Amino acid sequence: MRTIKSLILAIVMLVGFACQENQDYQDAITDGSYQIAAQLKLTDVIIHDIFSPPVASRIYAYPSIAAFEVVALADPSYKSLMGQLNGFDKKDFDTDGDIYYPLAALSAYYKVGTAMIFSEALMQTHKEKAFQEIRNKGVPKKIFDRSVALGEEVAAHVIAYAKKDNYHESRSFEKYTVTNDAYSWQPTPPAYMEGIEPHWNKIRPFVMERSNQFQSPPPTDFSTDANSQFFKEANEVFTVVKNLTKEQKDIAFFWDCNPYKVNVKGHVMFAEKKITPGGHWMGIAAIASKTAKQDWKGTAETLAYTSISLFDAFIACWDEKYRSRLIRPETYINKYIDEEWLPLLQTPPFPEYTSGHSVASNAAAETLTRLFGEPFHFVDSTEVAYGLPIREFDSFRIAADEAAISRLYGGIHYMPAIVNGSEKGKKLGEYLNEKIKTKGDNLAHTKE
């Protein structure tokens, strides 16, 4: 009898230890820290590979969507984006057996993110380190392998979806041809780079029906007459930049986000690699997620939703840029006002109207406000890694307004590009909020 009791006790203890082990591995990933770390690494690679702002928005979007699709498999309260995004066909996935969904989501993110970049080894190394940490937390090998496999299966579906967005075809489209029209954009110093992504409006949007769905009114009629409205707008840029306060300069530098900044020293020219505007807002999305103490599912939702808004924002903005092809302040002011004038920031290599910062920031702000409500205080430390201090905001909309006006302070845009760009971004963000449902009851985090 004593032997039987001892055996029963041993079995109970083994079951208890097994339950404890199971609980331990379930706690390997609870919040969004692993996906945020993966996104930060993706940002590093985007900077390393010098992707343009529109292309960077694409690189952020598809991995984020893949991770969120795993969330939708894990939790029926979340709604798949398949069938909601343009051309994203529905597909069933085999979820039989034990699957650790947080790991599957991370697997999907890394797989798609690596497929979007040039320096694949950098992402691969980061993934292997993260996966080893998760293994060390006790995830059983069979469950680990099955979870990674599910993530890669979801990733394959998303990669196939991405291949049909016309991006690869656009790589062979003709380059932008500079014209001699007085009003039209000209390459600017010091690198005099060619126009970036003149055919981005041909990329398939996620939610918009067409690239010009939120078309802005045309820019102010071009004129060199000192009494004209256009001259006054150019002179405003000239005057503001000459009289900037320290705070205005700080704001301009904080939101610069120019991945094409070129420095010249003597006969040597070298690039200063920086984050893109979309990368800055993806950083804000990650900060908001951590501030709100979201779990891994909420984090994936936030990053996917924000990346979708940024992707469509750059399509909408670039559609207008290469329709109006408007001259930059630097070119106009040097020719008609003061040939020695320089903007505070280096002029990016594409037409002026509308402001990309204004469109993208306001679209992202609307979607983030939908998720987290207003007011929402956050500390924006996104630029600390690039040598700039933090800035604090009480709402995403306030941050977007500052990002937009920073382009006037930087000498990059006339006011209509900022005002009309901001309006375009807001309308786009509102439209996305109406069209995309990531929760069965719309968006669960709304506080409005």
Image (cartoon, grey):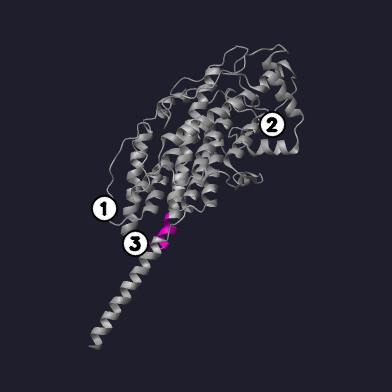
Q: Position of residue 284 (x, y in %)?
A: 55, 44
Looking at numbered disc 2 in the image, what kind of residue is underneath it? Tyr
- Residue at 38% x, 65% y: name it: 23
Tell me, for residue 340, which label it has, or none: none
Q: Which residues are magenta?
A: 131-139
Looking at numbered disc 3 in the image, what kind of residue is underneath it? Pro
Q: Is residue 233 left or right of residue 279?
A: right
How far is mark 3 from mark 2, CA to CA?
A: 55 Å
How far is mark 3 from mark 1, CA to CA?
A: 16 Å
Packing grade of label 3 (10 A; few <14, some 14-19, many >=20) is: some
For mark 2, what is the residue?
409
Q: Position of residue 131 (x, y in %)?
A: 42, 55
Q: Is residue 134 magenta?
A: yes
- Residue at 69% x, 20% y: name it: 234
Q: Position of residue 352 (x, y in %)?
A: 60, 23
For mark 3, what is the residue?
140
Tell me, for residue 96, which label it has, or none: 1
Q: Earlier in the sequence, mark 3 or mark 2?
A: 3
Packing grade of label 1 (10 A; few <14, some 14-19, many >=20) is: few
Q: Earlier in the sequence, mark 2 or mark 1?
A: 1
Q: Is residue 75 left or right of residue 313?
A: left
- Residue at 44% x, 52% y: name it: 296
The answer to whether mark 2 and mark 1 are in CB contact below 8 A is no
Can residue 271 be seen by looking at this rendering?
no
Label 1 element class: loop
The answer to whether mark 3 and mark 2 are in CB contact below 8 A is no
**For discs 3 and 2, the disc positioned in front in the rendered view:** 2
* Nearest the eye: 299 or 250: 299
Task: Identify the image quadrant of residue 216.
Answer: top right
* Nearest the eye: 269 or 379: 379
